[in-house]
């Protein structure tokens, strides 16, 4: 009889690009945990049925949630940490000891980890995008006393509302607008991702000590990061945040902290 293993997974639409299974299964193997981590394609109109089906599967430990479900999934699970009122998006669903499903968000911590040592207090920041990932970024920024925040988004009203929601001073601009000077530029949109339109921005207004941080990780070397490197700017790729947020989710799913001492080996694996 085949043993049925505990498992977690990542859901989204699209989902084939996801590197989360590589990360989690790498850690499971290193720790000798008998479990699995998969990917599952869930379209927007299938989300409610997906949650309902997994709720009844005792082997299912939870899932990571990616585009476009980070907002919609909040309607299907409990919210003990009041994520809806704080970050406003969930990227991780898990099971409580009594079998109930709850949501949380590990994106904010994952985003902040690579820049924790950068002195950003009072520094201006640009964020491109206004979806679930952007909301996690803005939540993190609101906790570290940054200066002015400029949000670049197709829907300027939505971007302006997010500034108010997170208590950030700044402005909202349409795509194509000239960038103001800023110490940190974050692409929290899907632009530049494989299968999406490229993100085309003029980085000439950024100071020489600016950091360009692209949350997109497929491809890892996006056009934005290539342009930043050509300008001699410091860059952070999406793999850094991906590993950071996955580490928190892994412990929630499998009850053990991941073996981060193998991060260099993991990053090489992700780059192949």
Image (cartoon, helix red, strand yellow):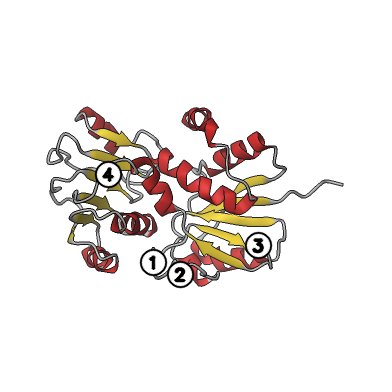
101, above or below 17, in the image: below
Q: What is the quadrant of residue 158 in the picture?
A: bottom left
Q: Are marks 2 and 3 in contact (CB under 8 Å)?
A: no
Residue at (60% x, 63% y) in the render? 50
Disc 1/disc 2 C-alpha distance (Å): 6 Å
* Residue matched to label 4: 199
Image spot of residue 231 (x, y percent):
19, 30
Residue at (39% x, 66% y) in the render? 86
Task: Name the element at disc 2.
Answer: loop
265, above or below 116, in the image: above
Disc 2/disc 3 C-alpha distance (Å): 22 Å
Task: Name the element at disc 4.
Answer: loop
* Residue matched to label 3: 54
Q: Which one is closest to the eye, mark 3 or mark 1? A: 1
Q: Are marks 1 and 2 in contact (CB under 8 Å)?
A: yes
* Residue matched to label 1: 86
Task: Name the element at disc 3.
Answer: helix
Quick check: 3 left or right of 62?
A: right
Image spot of residue 164 (x, y percent):
24, 68
Q: Are marks 3 and 1 in contact (CB under 8 Å)?
A: no
Which sits earlier in the primary sequence, circle 4 or circle 2? 2
Q: Which mark is drawn over residue 82?
A: 2
The residue carrying pointer 3 sits among few (fewer than 14), some (14 to 19) or many (20 or more) residues within 10 Å by Cα, namely some
The residue carrying pointer 1 sits among few (fewer than 14), some (14 to 19) or many (20 or more) residues within 10 Å by Cα, namely few
Quick check: 245 left or right of 183?
A: right
Residue 40 in view here: no
Residue at (37% x, 57% y) in the render? 136
Which sits earlier in the primary sequence, circle 2 or circle 3? 3
Disc 3/disc 4 C-alpha distance (Å): 36 Å
Residue at (36% x, 37% y) in the render? 237
């Amino acid at each position: 009889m085949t043993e049925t293993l505990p498992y977690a997974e990542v859901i989204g639409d699209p989902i084939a690009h996801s590197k989360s299974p590589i990360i989690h299964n790498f850690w499971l193997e290193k720790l000798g945990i008998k479990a699995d981590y998969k990917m599952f394609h869930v379209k927007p109109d299938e989300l409610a049925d997906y949650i309902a089906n997994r709720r009844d599967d005792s082997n299912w430990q939870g899932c990571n949630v990616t585009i476009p479900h980070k907002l919609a999934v909040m309607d299907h699970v409990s919210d003990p940490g009041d994520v809806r009122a704080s970050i406003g998006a969930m990227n991780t669903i898990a099971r409580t000891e009594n079998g109930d499903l709850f949501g949380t968000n590990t994106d904010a911590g994952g985003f902040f980890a690579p820049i924790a040592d950068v002195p950003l207090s009072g520094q201006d920041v640009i964020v491109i995008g206004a979806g679930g990932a952007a909301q996690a970024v803005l939540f993190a920024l609101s906790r570290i006393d940054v200066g002015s925040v400029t949000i670049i988004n197709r829907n300027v009203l939505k971007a302006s509302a997010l500034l108010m929601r997170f208590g950030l001073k700044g402005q909202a601009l349409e795509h194509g607008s000239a960038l103001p000077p800023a110490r940190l530029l974050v692409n929290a949109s899907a632009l530049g991702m494989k299968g999406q339109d490229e993100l085309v921005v003029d980085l000439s207004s950024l100071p020489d000590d600016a950091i360009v941080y692209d949350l997109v990780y497929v491809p890892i070397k996006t056009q934005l990061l290539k342009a930043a490197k050509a300008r001699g700017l410091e860059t952070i790729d999406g793999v850094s945040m991906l590993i950071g947020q996955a580490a928190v989710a892994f412990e929630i799913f499998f009850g053990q902290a991941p073996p981060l001492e193998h991060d260099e080996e993991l990053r090489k694996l992700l780059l192949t």
